[in-house]
Image (cartoon, rainbow, N blue to C red):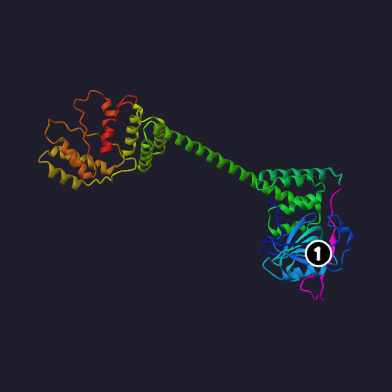
Amino acid sequence: MSDPIFLEENASKPSSPSHVQIITVGGSESEGDNGEQELPELLPILPLRAHVLFPGTMAPLNIERKASRKLLDDQLPQSRLVGLVTQRNEDVDEPKPDQLYGIGVLGNVLRMIQNSDDSVLILVQVIDRIRLTGFAEDNDEPYLKTRFEVLESAKPADDDETWIATVRNLRESAHALIDLSPSIPVEAKQALVGIDEPAALIDFLATNLSIELPQKQQLLEQIDVAKRLDEVQEIINNQLHIGELQQKLRDNVESEFSDAQRRAYLREQLNAIRKELGEGNSGEEQTTELRDRLEAAGLPEEVMTAAERELKRLEIIPSASPEHSVIVTYLETLAELPWAKLSEEEVDLKKARATLDRDHYGLDKVKQRLIEYLAVRKLNPHGRGPILCLLGPPGVGKTSLGKSIAEALGREFSRISVGGIRDEAEIRGHRRTYIGSMPGRLIQELRRA
């Protein structure tokens, strides 16, 4: 449902009546005295732009077109009844008979306010639906006059139980839609409670539904009250579904926003405490820097999850704590490992033989064995090859042979000396529970390379 609307005969917005003249039209201003007026044979027509009026409503209309002001000047001294018909194209300034819808409403002008800018504001009580039966051909006025007939709505019996249940369901749906729409004022629900007549209830809802103009005109032209109720109920059900989705989205956004606010507030408190302790905000800068490095390293998903968990711990652990340095070392090691880097391996046997001959004299059996190993590697690159063990006293060229092979393959070379190592933790790494724990030699060399 939409907010209460200010209906306009012209498309432009009403001016602020700084100096207005209020004119009471006719005799009584009561809403129920339209029955005292005799229906004219020819009814003057006020075309409406982009609005459809329904019986039982009160509508303020801003009149700016000269022809419409001439209509009011000519007709109101004689009769307060006018026809209010929506034009098919709101951009047309002087609509012809074929540019108006065939069904409109009969309106009773209750009050007219003359503004200082020559525009006129009228208050109209909408009485009944009317069908335009023929426009006057000998009309000398700039406004349209037409013959018409009042349309009587057909409705089920008041004691029909199915009809009573249908009307009650419509009323409950309208209440639910008002509750879902924060822009609708409380007065709308109060007005809804005060309407007992089903036809009036349906027209009231049709007036305030946010639907396109042709659909509103279709509701106006529907004479069968039961069918009109079904159409309004379907529209409300669709808007209820949309409103529930919007409410769910609003709740989700508010929940996420409140969580973000709470985290930001707690973070500010934590920074204030650190500032009082003389620690400053270096910890937050360090955490931000580590997070950026980890994201740039391209970690696998499960590794990044573990890193995020450690980052959250780092945010709350004081920098003076021994655990702080352990977590920083762990995260720096993760960021420096080549997760997303792989050097291309190029197995060129001629190049490998030339490199080995260039760096080493003799050692033909060793060179031949290395070339055979590379040949198998080239034929089956995805196979799990054996580990070559070069045995010999110091200085015979074991390490330099490894360097030559790495150079021939285009790979990095790392040397790990295990001489004198008595603790396996030197190779595989220490547990993080130990103060000053470090990764093992394998991981250190992998990071260095």
Residue 166 in which image quadrant: top right
Element type where label 1 sits in the image: strand
* Image coordinates for residue 405, horizontal then vertical, percent: 20, 41
Q: Nearer the viewer, residue 127 or 177?
A: 127
Q: Amino acid at mark 1?
A: Val
**Residue picked out by circle 1:** 82
Would residue 292 be counted in the magenta stretch?
no
* Image coordinates for residue 62, horizontal then vertical, percent: 72, 62
Left/right placement of residue 307 relative to residue 22 reads left
Left/right placement of residue 257 relative to residue 122 reads left
Whether residue 170 appears in this view of the structure is no
Tell me: residue 4, above or below residue 87: above
Give the quarter of the figure containing the C terminus: top left
Tell me: residue 138, above or below residue 81: below
For the record, the magenta segment spans 132-157
* Image coordinates for residue 365, horizontal then vertical, percent: 14, 37
Residue 94 in which image quadrant: bottom right
Left/right placement of residue 289 relative to residue 244 reads left
* Image coordinates for residue 90, horizontal then vertical, percent: 68, 65
